[in-house]
Structures are given as structure tokens and as C-alpha cells.
């Protein structure tokens, strides 16, 4: 379907990225390089062989490929290299602000120290200033781990409070509702963290989980979350409260042929501040500008709609009002020139 929105327009559009898993940016080339550096046999020796393992049809089958791939991340420098490689790609996508998810339990559970993970990632966040990107870190609990594991992880994170912007929740949602972690999120808020949670697309009990996250936990954003359109009352709630939803079209395409595009458009029409993001770009075939363009092309989005998605990414970011004003002015200037 033709559209007036070009790939170049989405590439240059100033934008924030609010939903990207740093472990999901591990490109085959870096995976092989780190495997060699750390003398780890991952069972593949070429880029093509790595790519051939990227076969999945749902969340569970994706995670079965995703977590074993992290074995190559061992040293602080590995985490730095991973994050800085993503940040360079983000700069090429004109990402001006990014809030990066990381999963410490996926690393501490295999013997990598929390300090190794956070210090490597944070060094890259600091160095991103040279790329003209404002970057921050969001620590996610793995929801298929225990409540006790989340509690211990949060306790450890308190020693690195100045390096972590917020707390999230991801991984396998089945039988792992938001309420499982209510106490941990209360403690996170009490310690000054922002909070968000994944509400993955088309999960069992999707609406109930979304309601728990919004009405009981009180999240500031909802990651994915497009199943909310099934409940008009909840749609009205997020519209009134201006709670951001972070949609990821290319990863959605693996479980939904329509990329949840109709839902994104419905939410836009209801004044819900939904934004577009890349999720796990190394695994789903595209970084953030690719996600914008794929959605714009398939659903013939107008430039105004695309710009509104970018505007939403800044208004729902965890940054100051002054930062938002500067980024929105930059966005307005870009639109005026295009």
C-alpha cells in the first residue's frame, strides 16, 4: 500500500525509544565475536547459522532462542559493547532519548555479577552523550522467576540507584500476572523508581493483566498493551490519565499478521499516547525507524499520524518538562522542514 511517508522521513524523524531490550539488540556479528572472545561454543560459526536459529511463532518459542544467546555476555566490556553498538544504531535512527530495558536475572542466574552487567551498560549510557543521545536504563524483573528473586534483585539494585531510571516486568506472561509482583513494585516506587510493565499481545487473560497493571499496580506506562482496545473503559482510563503504551510493530508481526496496526490507529484516534518502538530489533528484523516505516506503509499512515507517534514518545518519556519541550521543538522544526 502506498504512503506519503518515506523511509527517509521516518529515519530522520526525531524520536524517543521507550521499549527496547538491550539483550535483544545482540546482532549475529557481535554474538559470534563475543563467543570467540570468551571462548564459548554456541554451536554456530557463521552469521547465516546464527540467523537460521531465529525461528519462532510465539513468545515462548522466542524466549527459547533468546535466553541461550545471552551466554556470550560474560564480562563488563561485553555489556558495554552490546549497549554501545545499539546506541550507534539508535543515533543513525535519530533517536534523541532512549530508555533501555535490561534483564539482570538472566545474567546473575548464570553466574554473572549484577555489577558486571550494570557497570558495562552504564558506561555505554554515559558515552552515548558523544553520539548526542540521552540514554537511561530500566531494570526489568523476569516474571517467570520467583517473587523472592525479584525482591533480591531490587535490593541489589538499590546500591546502583543513580544508574537506574525505572523498573519493568517482562518475559513469559503465562501464569505470571502483574499482581505476583505487587509488593516489589510498591517497594520500587517507595525507592523513587518509575514503573512500567509488559502486557504482551494476545496473551491468556490479557485484559485482566492490563487491568491489574493499570488499576492496582499503578504503572506509568504499559509496554505492548494493545489488547486494551477490547475494553473501552480501560481505553478511556489511559486516555484520561495519558498513560503511554509502547507498541512494537515488527515483533508483533511474528504473532499477529496485522502488526496490531489497527489497534494502534484506534488508540491514536482515542487520544491514547501510544508510541512506536523496536523491542528486540536483532531478532525481529528492524530498528525503530524500520518499525515506523513498516506501520506507515502497511496502514497508509499520514505524516501527521507518524509525527503524533513520535510526539507521544517524548511526552510519555521519563524526562523533565524542559527536556520534553526541547525535543518537541526539535520535532516541530523537522516537520516544518519536511
Image (cartoon, rainbow, N blue to C red):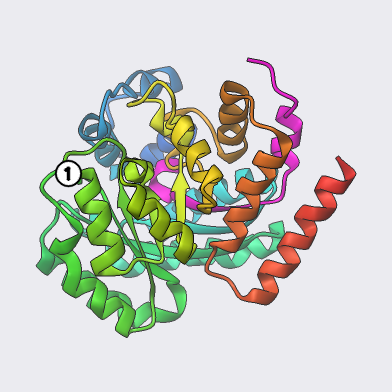
Report the residue at 58% width, 54% height from top. 313
Marks counted in the figure total 1
**Which residue is more in the foreground, 135 or 52?**
135
The residue sitting at 39% across, 37% down in the picture is 36
Residue at horizontal 61 percent and vertical 59 percent from the top: 314
Residue 7 covered by magenta stretch: yes
Residue 248 visible at all = yes
292, 78: nearer the viewer: 292
User: In the orientation shown, which residue stands out farthest toward the right?
Assistant: 337
Over which residues does the magenta segment extend? Answer: 1-25
Residue 188 is situated, as x and y percent measured from the top left of the image, at 30, 77
Give coordinates of residue 101: x percent, y percent.
Answer: 41, 56
Say whether residue 4 is magenta: yes
Secondary structure found at label 1: loop
On the rendered image, what quadrant is the N terminus found in?
top right
Residue 47: image quadrant is top left
Q: Nearer the viewer, residue 48 or 175?
A: 175
User: How would you rate the neighbour count of disc 1 (Cα within 10 Å): few for under 14, some for 14-19, many for 20 or more?
Assistant: few
Q: Is residue 38 visible?
A: no
Q: Residue at x 49, y 27 (%)?
A: 285
Dividing the picture into quarters, in which one does residue 41 lie?
Answer: top left
- Which x, y percent locates residue 109? 18, 56
Horizontal side of 336 relative to 56 (left or right) equals right
Q: Position of residue 250 (x, y in %)?
A: 47, 30
Quadrant housing the C terminus: top right
Q: Is residue 221 above or below residue 264?
A: below
Which residue is label 1 attached to?
205
Amino acid at each position: 500500500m502506498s504512503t506519503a511517508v518515506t523511509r527517509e522521513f521516518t529515519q530522520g524523524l526525531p524520536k524517543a525509544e521507550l521499549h527496547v531490550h538491550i539483550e535483544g539488540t545482540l546482532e549475529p556479528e557481535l554474538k559470534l565475536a563475543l563467543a570467540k572472545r570468551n571462548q564459548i561454543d554456541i554451536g554456530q560459526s557463521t552469521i547465516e547459522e546464527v540467523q537460521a536459529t531465529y525461528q519462532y511463532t510465539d513468545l515462548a518459542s522466542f524466549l527459547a532462542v533468546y535466553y541461550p544467546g545471552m551466554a556470550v555476555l560474560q564480562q563488563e566490556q561485553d555489556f558495554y559493547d552490546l549497549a554501545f553498538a545499539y546506541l550507534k544504531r539508535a543515533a543513525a535512527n535519530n533517536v534523541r532519548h532512549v530508555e533501555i530495558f535490561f534483564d539482570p536475572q538472566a545474567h546473575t542466574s548464570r553466574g554473572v555479577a549484577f555489577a558486571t552487567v550494570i557497570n558495562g551498560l552504564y558506561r555505554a549510557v554515559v558515552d552515548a552523550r558523544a553520539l548526542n543521545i540521552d540514554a537511561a536504563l530500566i531494570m526489568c524483573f523476569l516474571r517467570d522467576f520467583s517473587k523472592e528473586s525479584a525482591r533480591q534483585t531490587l535490593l541489589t539494585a538499590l546500591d546502583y540507584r543513580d544508574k537506574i531510571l525505572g523498573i519493568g516486568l517482562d518475559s513469559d506472561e503465562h501464569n505470571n500476572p502483574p499482581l505476583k509482583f505487587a509488593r516489589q513494585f510498591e517497594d520500587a516506587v517507595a525507592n523513587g523508581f518509575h514503573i512500567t510493565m509488559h502486557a504482551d499481545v494476545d496473551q491468556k487473560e490479557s485484559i485482566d493483566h492490563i487491568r491489574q497493571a493499570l488499576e492496582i499496580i499503578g504503572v506509568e506506562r504499559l509496554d505492548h498493551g494493545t489488547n486494551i482496545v477490547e475494553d473501552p473503559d480501560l481505553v478511556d482510563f489511559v486516555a484520561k490519565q495519558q498513560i503511554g503504551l509502547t507498541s512494537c510493530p515488527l515483533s508483533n508481526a511474528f504473532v499477529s499478521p496485522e502488526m496490531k496496526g489497527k489497534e494502534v490507529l484506534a488508540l491514536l484516534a482515542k487520544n491514547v499516547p501510544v508510541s512506536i518502538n523496536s523491542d528486540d530489533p536483532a531478532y525481529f528484523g528492524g530498528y525503530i525507524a524500520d518499525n515506523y516505516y513498516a506501520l506507515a506503509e502497511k496502514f497508509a499512515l499520514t505524516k501527521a499520524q507518524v509525527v503524533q507517534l513520535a510526539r507521544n514518545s517524548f511526552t510519555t518519556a521519563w524526562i523533565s518538562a524542559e527536556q520534553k519541550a526541547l525535543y518537541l521543538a526539535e520535532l516541530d522544526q523537522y516537520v516544518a522542514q519536511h
